Amino acid sequence: MTTDRNARAFRTIAVIVFGLLIAFGCVLRFWKLSNVGLWYDELWTVVGASNRPFGEMYREWILGDSHPPGFFLFYFAWLKLVPATEFWTRLPSAVAGVLTVVYLLWGTRRVLSRDERLCAAAFVSLSYVYVFYALSVKQYSAMLLFITIATITYLDIVAARQLERRQAVTLGAASVALAYLNHFGMVYAAMLFAMLFATFRGDRTVRPHIARLAAVCAIAYAPIVPFLYLQLKYNIDGWQPYQVGTFLANLTPSLFFNDPTVVWLALAVLALTLVARAARDRRVREQLWTIRNRHIVFIVVAFGTFMLVLGAVRPIFYVRYFLAMMPAVLLGLAVATAAAFPLDRRWAAIALLAFFSRAAVTQFRTIDALQREQWDKSVDLVLASHAPADAIYVLGASMDKTEFDYLRSGDVDGVFNVRNLKFYRYYFRRRGAAAVAAHLNVAEPTVESAKALGARFHDTGATIYVLAAHHLQYPGDALATLRRVTRRVQVTTLNGTLIYTLTF
């Protein structure tokens, strides 16, 4: 009896420590919400969806976006209620990140065991990409939430061999949300429906319900089909080069945490332990070889195959494009981990807690040191040093065309640089310098633009500032021209942001 009490006490303590580690991962999602400035992709949404008419937002921002319009539409409404600051604009992503963890703990009881729920929540809570995008004004945190819900609901339907109304509503709502958030999310949802059709191909009771649900989702998706057409027609992200080596190197630090030695050692130990336990214990083999687990594998293989085939013709080898399959990957990993390291075994619980404690420490250090592109800091530096008569320029593209105009003409640089002026105006206004914001001008990163600056300010003794962000800078020939037409060129380097101080 004493042994039983000790075992129960240890299990209770282990579960409590697990809960604390999971809660710590949730807290990390709020750690850097407000004390670092917005970066380019965040400004894209914040500036594009705030303080402007709907028609302008649609014409100048949504049409050239590489994503469906759902995220912009949400922020167009959200920013009518809250100020367009770092905290309030990032808060929905942080909440979505926490809801994903909460759902895995308490919304998956019909699909996952207690140990599997704890492992899945721990992996998701302390996964770098999950935390990073929970701290970003990007659609990926919400996308991961809805993919998790859709995947669990799919597994529930398959295991129960029936489609209840609750399951249909949940799967349908999650699928429509995914379609409006992300094109890959739409593909993932469509793949789940295709797998449901295949699973119930001989069931005349369930299959008609699946068909009706799929039809409802297709009708709901129909209004935004043109945005997928624009993405395919203009290949909006086609400017990105293939970086397969970098993609592979970033996979494990993104999915887990940035300590390759510990991560790969842990994965090796997991594989060896799982094989050893399965070989010795028939119950472990039965636990692994279930319909649910086979479908998790089918999901990962099917979507992974689609991405690899697509990668043969499109430059998609970036971690963010593979986010849609990460919930299924981590679910499978949680199932394998729970089978290899059952929490009622003291050695197993200690091993898992050691791994997740290491993950918590590493993620805290990583997130605490997180830096963005420092648009805000470059504005602060210029405001602290410029005189009222000093002109301030923004390195970018001419605003006589919209982003979509640049896209149609095939000018990739123009697509991304045309927003720079509005992004900097946003931060100057945030700093109470509306008059400065109103007089900002665009300087293009070309030799001709450098010569024009020289002709305008030659022998005036003026000092002007040129702000450059998102890794944009004067190329060598343009910078050499600037040095010839000025008395001095000083370059201040921040994190992805430059300040050119030109003295004539």
Image (cartoon, rainbow, N blue to C red):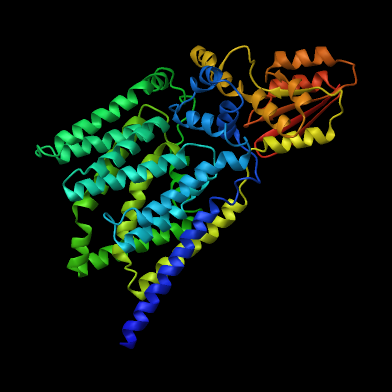
Q: Quick check: 45 left or right of 441?
A: left
* Image quadrant where one finds the C terminus: top right
Q: Residue at x 57, y 26 (%)?
A: 48
Q: Which residue is drawn at 63% across and 11% down?
A: 400
Q: Is residue 20 above or below residue 198?
A: below
Closer-to-camera residue (462/403): 403
Q: Residue furthest bottom?
A: 2
Where residue 352 sits, quadrant-wise, is bottom left
Would you identify the image quadrant in which residue 190 lies? top left
* Residue 223 visible to an observer of this rendering: yes
- Location of residue 319 in the rendering, given as x and y in whole percent from the top left corner: 44, 40
Q: Nearer the viewer, residue 236 or 430?
A: 430
Q: Relative to 420, is 175 above or below?
A: below
Residue 252 visible? The answer is no
- Label tally: 0
| Camera-side residue of 373 and 80 | 80
Q: In which quarter of the image is residue 87?
A: top right
Task: From the top left corner, tell me how far across and down residue 416 is, in percent.
Answer: 57, 24
Residue at x-position 39% and y-position 21%: 232
Left or right position of 6 against 481: left
Where's residue 229, x and y in %?
A: 38, 19
Tell me: residue 165, above or below residue 46: below
The answer to whether 144 appears left or right of 175 in the picture is right
x 34%, y 30%: residue: 310
**Rendered location of residue 73, percent (x, y):** 48, 28
On-image quarter of the N terminus = bottom left
